[in-house]
Amino acid sequence: MSSLKVKLSFSGGVELLFDNIKQKSIEISSSINPPNPTTMKDLILWMKDNLLKERPELFMSGDTVRPGILVLINDSDWELEGELEYEIEDGDDIVFISTLHGG
Amino acid sequence: MSSLKVKLSFSGGVELLFDNIKQKSIEISSSINPPNPTTMKDLILWMKDNLLKERPELFMSGDTVRPGILVLINDSDWELEGELEYEIEDGDDIVFISTLHGG
Amino acid sequence: DSPNLEDLTLAEYMRYGRQLILPGFGKTGQLKLKNTSMLIVGAGGLGAPAAIYLAATGVGKLGIIDHDTVEKSNLQRQIIHNESREGISKAQSAKMTIEELNSLCKCVAYEVLLDSSNALEIVKKYDIVIDATDNVATRYLLNDVCVIAGKPLVSGSALRMDGQLTVYNYKRGPCYRCLFPKPPPPESILNCADGGVLGVVTGIIGCLQALQAIKIAIENDESPNNLLIFSATSYPLFRSMKLRSKKKDCGLCGEHPFITELQDYVQFCGSGALDKSPSVKLL
Amino acid sequence: DSPNLEDLTLAEYMRYGRQLILPGFGKTGQLKLKNTSMLIVGAGGLGAPAAIYLAATGVGKLGIIDHDTVEKSNLQRQIIHNESREGISKAQSAKMTIEELNSLCKCVAYEVLLDSSNALEIVKKYDIVIDATDNVATRYLLNDVCVIAGKPLVSGSALRMDGQLTVYNYKRGPCYRCLFPKPPPPESILNCADGGVLGVVTGIIGCLQALQAIKIAIENDESPNNLLIFSATSYPLFRSMKLRSKKKDCGLCGEHPFITELQDYVQFCGSGALDKSPSVKLL
Ligand SMILES: [Zn+2]
Ligand SMILES: [Zn+2]
């Protein structure tokens, strides 16, 4: 099984759940659940188990991200890419951004 | 001989010399001067002969761009990439930008 | 009071000369601005530069809503006010600055808290709405009222060193509910009073809101639906992200909407415009 | 007159509260701002928002240079002035607005045309210089004086719908001559009076200049040397371009400099600060 390099970015406050780190490069298996290719759903669970430092309910809700967090894959809204079903590719640039409300 | 796809962008006023077009995708030979690979120097001359609509002295000076125009190759200053000697690659994103002075 | 659709006055030719000679703007653009009305909700960090630049550039009518009064601690970023305005209404203070800058701009100050009872009546009088508020309940309210009244919503936000900018309900683009059908948990929300904000970050986002409103008014916006993300401490400073189109199953703007009137947004969000300090403030 | 390096006053704690609670800023950052002096060259479209936000955020001392007087046609973008200031010095008008906004900021107005005879004497009194000018001769002058005096130069420019932002002579980064050893041909240069400019574009770039100056003052800038390019009509709106380091063979800041004093910049560039309309204006 090969591994995938993925660049994760956290913005708008989500970084506070991940040790206040704004960018992190990770390597994950190309098939976290063999024989299926690794999807966004797998990645989010992997992040919860391996990276999350603070209260998981502020990152996840059910098997997806909580309301108010938007996921962007290679500079596009994940809704355009298949959301949880999107199959991660080597070199992907994935942003988790929390909406801001201040002014 | 193969061809190279290159994305050209013009900004800061340089676009006025190129029919007021801000972005243009071109295809050029991978070896404009066989057997040598196509370089930035070849590309600039090719642009002068094939794309330039207005007074060439406002784009070129000698065999390079005129003072006040900066060239950027894939989001980097061309000085970091070898300037005129840089060998064009398929998919390159090249920006010609004129410095602005207004305020 | 009725705007002259036909031509610019001599005073306008003199004042807006730098825009009249501008390719892609010119007299056509200037006349469109003159005949466009915009509503700025919030005369705080975002609303201040947005209102100033929209008035300066020649928007014919500006409405400004804010129920709050000017405090010294606002002046670190709310640059439409000044020390002499302490204690007076932010909406009135903003109107004073705008009238000093450009007496040709008709400015209406609303000293009210925008809520479900008054929002539709005010919003329907304007062509473009600028969300310069600071709380999630008012953001849902403004989204819903703009979809119901058919107005584009130029939404900005800023917190700490970060900012975001999106246009909702414009062309085929999404509304706020297409992206966020459910509100975030109240304990995940931080406001400027509790999270802090670098003043000039609101300046940058507020100016960009003014720009987007101008582009809509002069019908010069060919960009895809997008979210602009700013972070003062990142490189690059800005990233543009392509957003989904309007969602067919959006409860508000979709094909079979079930949200057809304004609701109780404080209850919906679990927090409101008047909550100055949520009890939990992790995010 | 001597700034208190030790602590903030109660008035400062109250006013700057939103920044004092800001991670990565806090009291340390606020004290650094208080003890930093900045010189803004030009109280026009770029200088207006830069001066306003720098004063609001708590910079201890601001110098503002402009030899010009306020005209109505400036008010489309130069939002530090207003209608009542018509005919008075732009430097004085800017100082008035700043003192109304933040009386804690010490503001010095210079009603002079910056040139080789006075530039070094003024610049050496400040820690950071902001180039908010509108002509190429003054840009070379400011670059040279900043290298000679050892000051970082936050350079912004705006024309039509476009803007650019760079920090010169900072850390290992280039100076303006490293990038542009020779001036552009005079007939290629367009200014705002002839090319036009959308007012809010100068607002966006001026705010970003204020941000970069703040980041230098609080020593929070880890970005590579870069040029930020803005275009109101492009998607994305912003692009960041990595720039070369300081050039070893730069005549001004290189290893063997041969430009060691200020020169005649009007002659060097073939045009000067007082040329309002170049005869040829293609670019
Ligand atoms: Zn919707
Ligand atoms: Zn140099």
Image (cartoon, coloured by chain):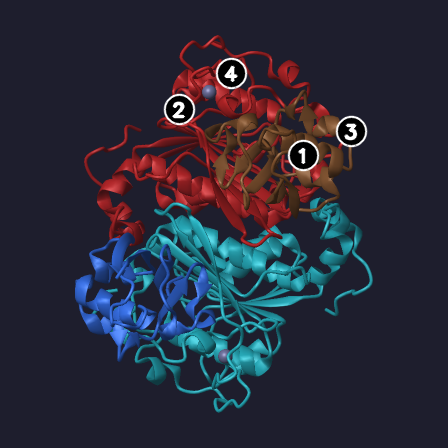
Chain colours: A blue, B brown, C cyan, D red
Instruction: Please give the chain letter of the residue carrying mark 3.
Output: D
Disc 2 to disc 1, how far (Cα)?
26 Å
Residue B30: x %, y % from top left: 60, 38
Tell me the quarter of the image containing the N terminus of chain C: bottom right
Residue type marked 1: Asn
Discs 3, 2 touching: Cβ within 8 Å: no
Say which residue label 3 marks.
D280
Residues at marks 4 and 1 on the same chain: yes
Question: At 60% from the left edge and 79% from the top edge, which residue is drawn?
Answer: C150
Between label 1 and label 3, give the one nearer the viewer.
3
Disc 2 to disc 4, how far (Cα)?
16 Å
Residue in the foreground of this view, choosing between D251 and A94: A94
Discs 4, 1 touching: Cβ within 8 Å: no
Residue in the foreground of this view, choosing between D121 and D194: D194
Q: Is mark 3 within 8 Å of ligand 2?
A: no
Question: At 58% from the left edge and 50% from the top edge, which residue is drawn?
Answer: D200
Figure quadrant of residue D264: top right
Mark 1 burial class by Cα count in 10 Å: few <14, some 14-19, many 20+: many
Q: Secondary structure at mark 3?
A: loop
Height in image: C143 above or below B48? below
Looking at the image, residue C238 sits to the left or right of residue D215; the answer is: right
Work out whether mark 3 precedes mark 2 in sequence or the reverse, and give the earlier one.
2
Residue A26: x %, y % from top left: 26, 55
Height in image: C47 above or below A42? above
Residue type marked 4: Asn
